[in-house]
Image (spheres, rainbow, N blue to C red):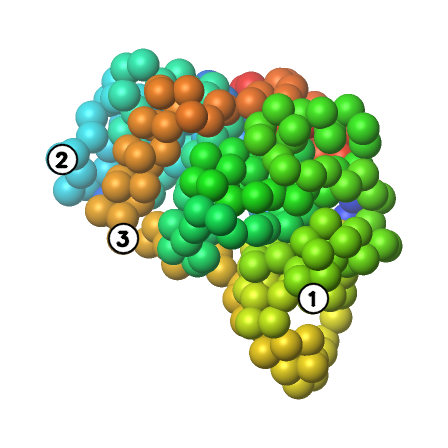
């Protein structure tokens, strides 16, 4: 079985192709052959040593494909069933072991490619706008990296619920993309410089109700400055690196702010909750409320190039690998 292996932490060049023994599903697990594999910033964190796995390991956690074998005690799935997953380890491979509790059955009208492109980021946008800080009509939000995978979905879900979105992007072309999604205002910036002042100008000096930040270190300070008193800072990623340590009194000095660092694992651990969120997500896709927005497809052996393109923000939308 071909798989991508990280033998030491580092840059994209540490992603190498290897032949590994084919895995077998254990109790409560299924073996799946993916036809599409999602590439995420989480994979980059792991490759750089910011995640849990220790080398050697196979990165990746998201994909979609067909069940080929089931483990002991599995009755809800059978060989030939189509599933998607976003929390199964060792995903950059021709065969993946998926816990049944993490497997999402795919409706006939949802393709493997769309499911692999949508599930992790779509579920993230879902819980961020329904559970972490429910979208409210008339509210205002700052969304960083709004042309990226989660950013696009956040922008769309917020605007469809009547929230005015100020979107940050890295290029004028990406600004056009997020404007088409309904963004109220777009700010073209390479980092956090000047963002807070522009946000306050756009909001009459008040600031926004909520900041959605998946960038981390480069935009953290600007996000705090852009919030209104008692606003909410939602830090859901760290694409530019972790935010520096800070004194919690900083939140008080900026107006009694709320800060949360949510993760998908805590919002889709229960299989029933995972299924409920997934069904709603696929319904939005089916109805045209959102789209999977595949930004590029790479061969499995080109995983390093996919990582470079994602990390250097060369892409718009979701990147996929094909075994």
Which residue lies at the image location 77% right of the left edge and 54% below the top edge?
Answer: 201
Tell whether 253 sits left or right of 83.
Answer: right
Q: CA distance from mark 1 to mark 2?
A: 49 Å
Which element is circle 1 on? Answer: helix
Res 129 label:
none
On screen, residue 192 above or below 319: below
Residues at discs 1 and 2 in contact (Cβ within 8 Å)? no
Residue highlighted by disc 3: 270
Residue highlighted by disc 2: 75
Q: Nearer the viewer, mark 1 or mark 2?
A: 1
Residues at discs 2 and 3 in contact (Cβ within 8 Å)? no
Res 224 label:
1
**Could one spot residue 308 in this view of the protein?**
no
Q: CA distance from mark 3 to mark 1?
A: 33 Å
- Residue 275's spot in the image, x, y percent? 27, 40
Q: Earlier in the sequence, mark 2 or mark 3?
A: 2
**Could one spot residue 232 in this view of the protein?**
yes
Q: Quadrant of residue 86?
A: top left
Which residue lies at the image location 59% right of the left edge and 51% below the top edge?
Answer: 141
245, 249: nearer the viewer: 249
305, 146: nearer the viewer: 146
Q: Earlier in the sequence, mark 3 or mark 1?
A: 1
């Amino acid at each position: 079985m071909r798989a991508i292996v990280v033998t030491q932490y580092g840059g994209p060049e540490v992603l190498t192709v290897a032949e590994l023994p084919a895995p077998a599903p254990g109790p409560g697990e299924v073996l799946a052959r993916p036809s599409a594999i999602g590439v995420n910033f989480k994979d980059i964190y792991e490759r750089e040593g910011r995640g849990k796995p220790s080398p050697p390991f196979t990165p990746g956690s998201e994909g979609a494909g067909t069940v080929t074998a089931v483990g002991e005690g599995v009755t809800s799935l059978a060989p030939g069933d189509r599933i998607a997953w976003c929390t199964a380890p060792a995903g950059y491979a021709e065969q993946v072991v998926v816990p049944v509790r993490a497997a999402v059955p795919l409706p006939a009208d949802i393709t493997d490619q769309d499911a692999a492109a949508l599930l992790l980021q779509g579920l993230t946008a879902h819980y961020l706008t329904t559970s972490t800080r429910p979208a409210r009509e008339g509210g205002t939000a700052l969304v960083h990296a709004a042309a990226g995978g989660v950013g696009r979905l956040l922008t769309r879900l917020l605007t469809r619920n009547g929230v005015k979105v100020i979107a940050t992007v890295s290029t004028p072309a990406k600004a056009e993309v997020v404007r088409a999604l309904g963004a109220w205002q777009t700010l073209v910036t390479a980092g956090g410089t000047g963002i807070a002042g522009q946000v306050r100008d756009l909001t009459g000096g008040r600031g926004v109700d909520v900041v959605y930040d998946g960038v981390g270190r480069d935009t953290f300070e600007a996000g705090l400055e852009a919030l209104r008193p008692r606003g909410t800072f939602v830090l859901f990623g760290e694409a530019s690196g972790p935010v520096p340590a800070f004194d919690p009194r900083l939140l008080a000095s900026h107006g009694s702010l709320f800060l949360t660092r949510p993760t998908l694992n805590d919002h889709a651990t229960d299989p029933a909750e995972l299924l409920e969120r997934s069904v709603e997500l696929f319904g939005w896709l089916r109805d045209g409320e959102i789209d999977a927005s595949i930004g590029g497809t790479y061969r499995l052996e080109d995983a390093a190039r996919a990582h470079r393109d994602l990390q250097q923000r060369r892409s718009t939308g979701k990147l996929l690998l094909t075994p």
